[in-house]
């Protein structure tokens, strides 16, 4: 941010702190709801009928929601002459839908329906789809909107986007899970007394956490309205309200990419190694491992699961900060860090496959290793993914289009494969302490 302040000062422009603040608050709504759902997984898994399989359902739902940015991009291309107005209408709609979905999640997340003789969390699944639809579509709506402001203000928006992962993870850390599972007497379907896990006792309820997410969406919506209508912010805007091309996103995984230069022609075959690497990383990081996270971590206890769900969200913006200090300039560097992330992935998959009795279960060392493994995995893969995007950036919109396609293909394939492994082939077994 200091560099942008220097640039603005050098140009003789007076920076408006209010514009910075409002853009930060606006950026928070980009991914705060989806990140919040993942931060709340330890409590949701313990309470809902899907149990340990819940993350595999949610991963597929999030991938389905990626239809949103595709459809919006098509609509925006057809209405190119009115794209500026369309972006404004889209932001208001998305913030409203996101806030409503979070509010209803707080009220209805426990509601279930019987499908095929099995109870399912249909209310939560439906609402998470709308939450994910809003957050995924923000990638192609919010950044073009920020192009209306002078270049230096983009960093303020990106800070807000980084906080969209940090804030819910901090609130979830404060919420806690009430410790590891304890066994109490309960009754089974036949009325017999059997030991069952006691209900978790966080500092505040899941309902309240969803209300917090709703409040963040409302705050972001108010910030956006002020950005639109406050006359005193006029000096922060560009003279002509332009919009950045949807086909050339300015950020990936919450990290701003370097400014594009003139596009350099490049054949798809020349990009293939980087695109294949990106697809492989996305398969693991966005598809397979999030779907089996509960099997990997819960055998070590609720506290370990809680720490993984929250600290791994913090690893994402931390990796972005590292990228500022040490940008990826060669493909071999991205591949090297991805390989280290792959080693972490192997360990995490082993712990999931060996559930309910993974290595070092019941020891402090086992808990520390699995938490560290998850945090390192998220940090290393984030660094690699954004590094690959930075390497492809000079080749223009076509290269970034294929980057997005590789990301989506890997993510979808991984989520579907993990869903089948968990729910159809019963390849993973849960740990039940009682």
Image (cartoon, rainbow, N blue to C red):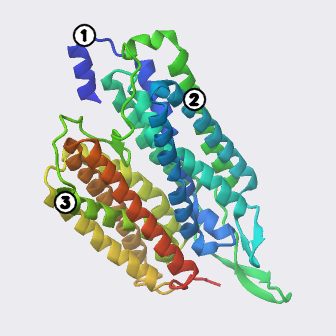
Going from N to C along the chain, the mark reached first, 3 or 2, is 2
Q: CA distance from mark 3 to mark 1?
A: 45 Å
Q: Is residue 297 visible?
A: no
Task: Examine the rendered structure and indicate whether residue 330 appears above or below residue 303.
Answer: above
Mark 3 sits on what residue?
A: 269
Q: Which of the two residues, 347 or 421, is positioned nearer the viewer here?
A: 421
At mark 1, the secondary structure is loop
- Marks 3 and 1: which is nearer the front? 3
At mark 2, the secondary structure is helix
Q: CA distance from mark 2 to mark 1?
A: 33 Å
Task: Examine the rendered structure and indicate whether residue 386 appears above or below residue 247.
Answer: below
Q: Is residue 169 left or right of residue 329?
A: right
Going from N to C along the chain, the mark reached first, 3 or 1, is 1
At mark 3, the secondary structure is helix
Residue 424, by quadrant, is bottom right
Mark 1 sits on what residue?
A: 12
Q: Is residue 353 visible?
A: yes
Which residue is depicted at the point 50% across and 59% down? 63
- Marks 3 and 2: which is nearer the front? 3
Residue 245 in the image: state x and y as whole percent. 36, 34
Which residue is depicted at the point 30% across and 55% down? 385
Furthest residue toward right: 191
Residue 155, by quadrant, is top left
Q: CA distance from mark 3 to mark 2?
A: 39 Å
Mark 2 sits on what residue?
A: 89
Q: Quadrant of the N terminus?
A: top left
The 10 Å Cα crowd at callout 1, few under 14, some 14 to 19, many 20 or more, is: few
Residue 273 in the image: state x and y as whole percent. 20, 63
Q: Quadrant of the C terminus?
A: bottom right
């Amino acid at each position: 941010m200091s560099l942008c302040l220097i640039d603005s000062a050098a140009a003789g422009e007076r920076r408006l702190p209010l514009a910075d603040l409002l853009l930060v608050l606006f950026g928070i709504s980009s991914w705060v709801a989806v990140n919040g759902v993942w931060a709340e997984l330890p409590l949701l898994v313990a309470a809902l009928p899907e149990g340990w399989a819940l993350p595999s359902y949610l991963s597929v739902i999030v991938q389905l929601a990626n239809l949103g940015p595709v459809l919006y991009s098509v609509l925006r291309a057809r209405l190119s002459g009115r794209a500026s107005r369309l972006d404004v209408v889209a932001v208001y709609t998305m913030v409203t839908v996101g806030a409503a979905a979070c509010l209803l999640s707080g009220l209805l997340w426990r509601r279930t329906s019987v499908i095929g003789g099995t109870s399912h969390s249909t209310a939560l699944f439906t609402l998470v789809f709308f939450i994910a639809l809003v957050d995924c579509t923000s990638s192609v709506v919010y950044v073009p909107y920020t192009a209306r402001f002078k270049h230096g203000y983009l960093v303020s928006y990106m800070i807000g986007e980084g906080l969209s992962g940090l804030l819910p993870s901090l609130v979830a850390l404060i919420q806690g899970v009430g410790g590891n599972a304890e066994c109490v007497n309960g009754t089974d379907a036949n009325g017999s007394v059997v030991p069952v896990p006691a209900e978790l006792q966080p500092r505040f309820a899941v309902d309240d956490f969803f209300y917090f997410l709703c409040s963040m969406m409302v705050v972001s919506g108010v910030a956006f309205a002020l950005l639109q209508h406050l006359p005193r912010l006029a000096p922060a805007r560009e003279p002509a309200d332009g919009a950045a091309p949807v086909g050339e996103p300015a950020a990936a995984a919450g990290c701003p990419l370097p400014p594009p230069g003139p596009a350099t022609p490049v054949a798809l075959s020349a990009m293939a190694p980087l695109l294949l690497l990106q697809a492989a990383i996305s398969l693991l990081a966005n598809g397979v491992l999030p779907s089996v996270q509960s099997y990997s971590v819960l055998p070590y206890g609720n506290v370990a699961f809680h720490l993984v769900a929250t600290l791994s969200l913090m690893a994402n913006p931390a990796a972005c900060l590292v990228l500022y200090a040490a940008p990826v300039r060669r493909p071999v560097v991205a591949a090297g860090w991805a390989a280290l992330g792959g080693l972490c992935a192997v360990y995490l998959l082993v712990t999931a496959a060996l559930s309910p009795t993974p290595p070092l279960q019941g020891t402090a060392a086992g808990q520390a290793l699995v938490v560290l493994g998850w945090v390192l995995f998220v940090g290393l893969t984030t660094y690699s993914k954004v590094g690959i995007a930075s390497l492809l950036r000079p080749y223009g919109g076509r290269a970034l289009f294929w980057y997005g396609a590789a990301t989506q293909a890997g993510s979808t394939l991984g989520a579907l494969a993990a869903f089948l492994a968990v729910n159809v082939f019963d390849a993973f077994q849960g740990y039940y302490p009682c």
